[in-house]
Amino acid sequence: MGIKSNIFLGIVVILMMASCQHTSNREHYITSGQAWLDTDSSLINAHGGGVLYYKGLYYWYGEYKGDSTYRLEQVDTWECWRADARGVSCYSSPDLSNWKFEGIVLKPVKEDHSSDLHPSQVMERPKVIYNEKTGKFVLWMHVDSPDYGKGMAGVAVADRPTGPFRYLGSLKPNGFDCRDQTLFKDTDGKAYHICSTDWNKSLMVSLLSDDYTKPSGQYKRILVGQKREAPAVFKRNGTYYLLTSGCTGWDPNEASYATADSLMGEWRIQGNPCKGPKADKTFDAQSTFVLKIEGQDRYIAMFDRWNKQDLIHSSYIWLPIDFDGGEMTIEWKDRWNLNLGNTK
Ligand code: DGJ
């Protein structure tokens, strides 16, 4: 073989390698229910979480659980399994698959037993949205006493998505108790807090103040008497979707979703969107958030598969949402390709 042929062969090999790399960069798989490691090969510890997209990166915030689980014996009406609340964790990713640990962005307060942020207290379901007007990242979460008797929301703000978040304190939205919760920022810049209230009998939607740190005073109780928790809200083609679970502590139950033309409007119950094995138990998991893939009409339903006696080892179930004739379905998949290049 002459020098020219060798050079030609070399170029072909380099081009082939480059194209393989390109393909593998685009192929990111989600495998639900198994240990999910961060880019340092540590277990991702971000339970009850939510994801924010900001300037080219996704940020996953969640409960950073302590490594030992104990049961609060003084609570005898339900199985109150607890792990220490070690703050709110944050992971960043360009591709929703490889997650870099950004640290504990809201730190626990170890010295003050009465602080909402003391590890013995409940700190769950943190969600973060960005306020364009103030330039602040605003975090809301469920804060509670160890036996879940207090029922409040905690609020914190930061200048950067990776914190540090400064705790502003806790409140009862519109004077009502509040437990499982989420945030939703609408396309007009208005933001809403959605939580279980009336001791989990109903949900409440509260319009937030312009800086997103307080309820504005405008609110509506929804799904009254339906006993739903674990709310996750998103909007598609002008319709609002609300995915929830029933109330059975850490044990799985049947999911349900509702739709509305406005967040403060009438919500229509649509039933269980899950399909496949264990669909009647939400694949042994519980909803926490619906993530919209940036710039695409594609949505991922995020769930926690709680391991109630070893909470830190609860796993994550992420599944694509399908819309067929307006109906929402979430079908079990052992493993699926995020296929970020696919814009449909
Ligand atoms: C169900 C809630 O959705 C979880 O966030 C947690 O509060 C457990 N209950 C506690 O049992």
Image (spheres, rainbow, N blue to C red):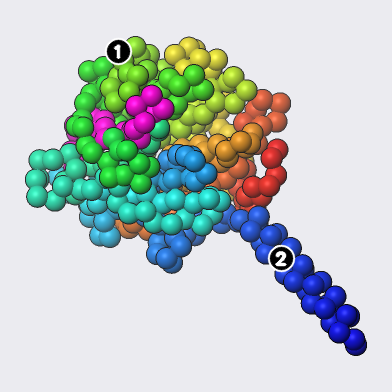
| Magenta segment | 131-156
Residue visible at 66% across and 61% down in the picture: 24
Q: Residues within 10 Å of mark 2 (few under 14, many from 20)?
A: few
Mark linked to residue 217 = 1
Above-or-below relation of 341 to 230: below
Residue visible at 32% across and 18% down in the picture: 209
Q: At which x and y percent is residue 291?
A: 52, 38
Q: As rendered, which of 201 and 25 lies closer to the eye?
A: 25
Q: Amino acid at mark 1?
A: Gly
Q: Which residue is mark 2?
A: 18
Q: Gap between marks 2 and 1, in whole Å?
A: 56 Å
Which image quadrant for residue 17?
bottom right
Q: Amino acid at mark 2?
A: Ala
Left-right relation of 145 to 178: left
Q: Residue furthest bottom?
A: 1
Assess whether residue 146 is covered by the magenta stretch. yes
